[in-house]
Image: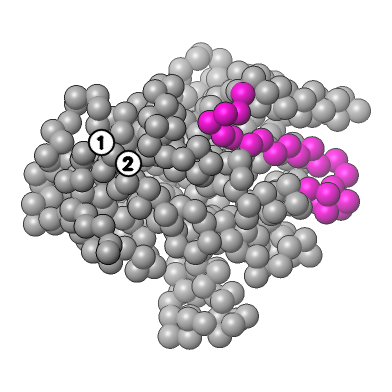
Amino acid sequence: MATKYTKFDNEKRDQYTILVPSMLPIHFRLLKPIFKQSGYNIEVLTNDSDQVKEEGLAHVHNDTCYPALLVIGQFIDALKSGKYDLDHVALVITQTAGGCRASNYLSLLRKALQMEGWEHIPCLSVNFSGLEKDSGLKITMPMLLRVLYCILYGDALMWLKNQVMPYELNRGQTEQAIDEIVSVLEKEFVEGGYRHSKRIYKMMIEKMKAIPRSQESKIRVGIVGEIYMKYSPLGNHDLENYLMREGFEPVVTGVMDFGLYCIENGIIDYEYYHRHAKTHSLFSLAKSLIMRMQKTFEQAVKKDGTFVPPEDFNQVIRDGKGFIDQGVKMGEGWLLTSEVVSLVKNGVNNIISAQPFGCLPNHIVAKGMVRRIKEVYPKANIVAIDYDPSASRVNQENRIRLMMANAKLNADS
């Protein structure tokens, strides 16, 4: 008999605080005004102490996917903090469906709540596969459009930040500029001006290039990997800032590329297996629309000429061909290999692949592809870092330092 769980009453959504686990520091700051317009009061969690991992270990098997352990630990730690009314709080996570263990996060979370006697706390699922049909979260087209722009603007700001912060002459000015830009974007989402992307991108670029920067040349290091470990400071020990402190420039591609990867997989399924026959044209239309929206930022950066523009996603797709078949689409699948090749072709020879330990699909398309990539690009300096509750942070950083040492040797040669 299936375990009963509390469903979220969408009609009473204004009475609840909905907690969101952290992942994308810039992007998620824009979520609150977006969901507020639809009557949802969300709060992105910021608790990141060692207790988060301890709560995860206490409520999830230690062999479970590390992102699941951290996400659930962050929820439990927040609920125990005393900050929230446990009768008027809900939790929300995404579900991928498919072969990734992330499809099971919701079941693991409900089991963890049951262990604490909190079965009454509703858990909401954000998925587009029908995996959780009655989560209570109503995704409308206006909300979806605002979230789409939120991701695009977050990607753009993250891309600019990593080209400015390593070189800022006055520490903290980049963060201050980000705060100012986020405040403008919050207002734009409330007042409806968020669609004027050309004006917004120009504003971003002007604010970021106004920051005094050194002309020092720094080695660029790309970060790829499983989506949570790639972007979450909680998961990867604040990897971007660690690289900056060590004198490197991190290069992190946008999360919208992962969304495009998912859409492209729908197109691939049709080409390979004749699946999604009825929705094939919608996948193609969505891909075309989103890529045109991405192109607006790329063109704005090229027109200004101050910063390096991101790679066009169609080119990322082409870069991976000859290395990995597009039928490989479990986890980050062919996208991870394509991102590595794209970075190396654009002069970013030093790559960190951040993986949860035991993430089989991503180990295959990351570690498993290193030899093949290095056969074609001998200068590629790739290190895979496994993250796990039992993994030593010192050992992880030592492996990264070895990659850094090789990067400096290659730069001097």
The residue drawn where x is 56% and y is 76% is 269
Q: What's the magenta region?
A: 370-392
Q: Which residue, given by chain and number where applicable, does mark 1 sit on?
A: 116
The reply to whether dot 1 and dot 2 touch (C-beta < 8 Å) is: yes
Q: Amino acid at mark 1?
A: Glu
For the C terminus, the image quarter is top right
For residue 170, above or below residue 84: above
Asked if one can make out residue 67 in the rendered structure from this viewpoint, the answer is no
Residue 279: quarter of image:
bottom left
Q: Which residue is mark 2?
A: 112
100 or 283: nearer the viewer = 100
Residue 352 place in picture, x, y as percent = 68, 37
Indicate the position of residue 105 as horizontal and vertical percent values: 40, 50
What residue lies at 73% left-to-right and 37% top-to-bottom?
383
Q: Is residue 237 or residue 182 the one in the foreground?
A: 237
Q: Quadrant of the N terminus?
A: bottom left
Q: From the viewer's perspective, is 209 left or right of 215?
A: left
Amino acid found under the numbered disc labelled 2: Ala
Q: CA distance from mark 1 to mark 2?
A: 7 Å
Vertical arrangement, residue 209 with respect to residue 33, above or below: above
Q: Residue furthest top?
A: 170
The stretch drawn in magenta includes residue 152:
no
Q: Position of residue 342 (x, y in %)?
A: 70, 51
Kindly state the secondary structure of the residue where label 1 is placed: loop
Q: Residue at x 66, y 35 (%)?
A: 385
Residue 367 at x, y = what percent? 73, 47
Judge whether residue 379 is colored magenta.
yes
- In the picture, measured across the screen, residue 56 lies left or right of residue 227, that is left
Q: Which of the 4 image quadrants contains residue 56?
A: top left
